[in-house]
Image (cartoon, rainbow, N blue to C red):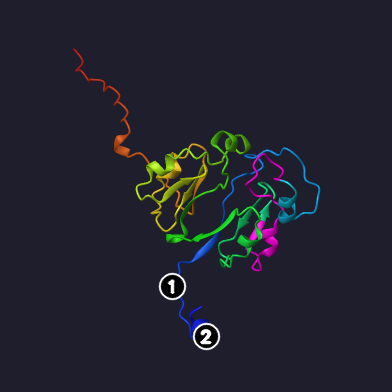
Amino acid sequence: MQKVAAVLGVEVAVKEPQVAVVRCNGTCENRPRTNEYGGYQSCRVKAALYSGDTGCSFGCLGCGDCVAACQFGAISMDPATGLPVVDEEKCTACGACVKACPKAVIELRNKGRRNMRVFVSCVNKDKGAVARKACKAACIGCGKCAKVCPFEAITVENNLAYIDFTKCKLCKKCVAECPTGAIHAVNFPVVKPKPEAASAAPKPEAAPVAENKPKEE
């Protein structure tokens, strides 16, 4: 970008590397189907006809318009979950998938320090009870995440929490606080439990030693 800008005689502001993020956790398990769609396999066409195959009218429609729009082969549909998966190594953050999604489920977010990110994997703006009925992993807008965030990176608007990636410091307090598991932490190292110290283990009791008494003559 800097080289192209130099040729064109313009300046390019430094920008953090970004990646496409799928903000929907409505897997087949979390979001049961209520009807079956038999029309043309296009998210845009499907969205124009009705709200979708499930009770959630905000989530991924699963037809793969984002896959077709990506020129780098960075997105594929997971048959087990019915959701698109982004290959971070191939994604160039061009934004084609964002434009292709009629439900605005895909967002460009900063890759983050060491590619670690925290985001709300939900775009459902229904009230809590309605959203939870449609999807077990939906954000219910309870605001617990916003209250626990020490950096004021989370706001709740229209029954939906959103994490500002420019303010988030990756403390993950919101992840532990979310009652539905709607907040996802990506690429964090797995913390293994520390092995118990050998000194802490109780030592086996020593067997009693028999006394050798002198024999009487």
- Residue shown at 56%/66% (left/top)? 93
- Residue shown at 36%/50% (left/top)? 151
User: Can residue 194 be seen in this snapshot?
Assistant: no
Pick whichever, 206 or 32, lies toward us: 32
Report if the CB atoms under discs 1 and 2 are less than 8 Å apart.
no
- Distance from disc 1 to disc 2, alpha carbons, whole Å, reads 17 Å
In the picture, residue 85 is in which quadrant? bottom right
Q: Amino acid at mark 1?
A: Val
Q: Which residues are magenta?
A: 51-76
Q: Position of residue 125 (x, y in %)?
A: 56, 44
Q: Say which mark, if any, is on residue 101.
A: none
- Residue shown at 64%/68% (left/top)? 72
In the picture, residue 204 is in which quadrant? top left
Q: Position of residue 13 (x, y in %)?
A: 44, 74
Query: Label 1 belongs to which residue?
Result: 14
Quadrant where the C terminus is found in the figure: top left
- Closest to the camera, between mark 1 and mark 2, is 2
In the picture, residue 70 is in which quadrant? bottom right
Q: Amino acid at mark 2?
A: Leu
Label 1, secondary structure: give it: loop
Residue 49 position (above or below residue 86)? above
Q: Report whether 62 appears left or right of 111.
A: right
Q: Say which mark, if any, is on residue 8.
A: 2
Majority SS type along the magenta span = loop
Q: Position of residue 43 (x, y in %)?
A: 71, 54
Q: Position of residue 209 (x, y in %)?
A: 26, 23
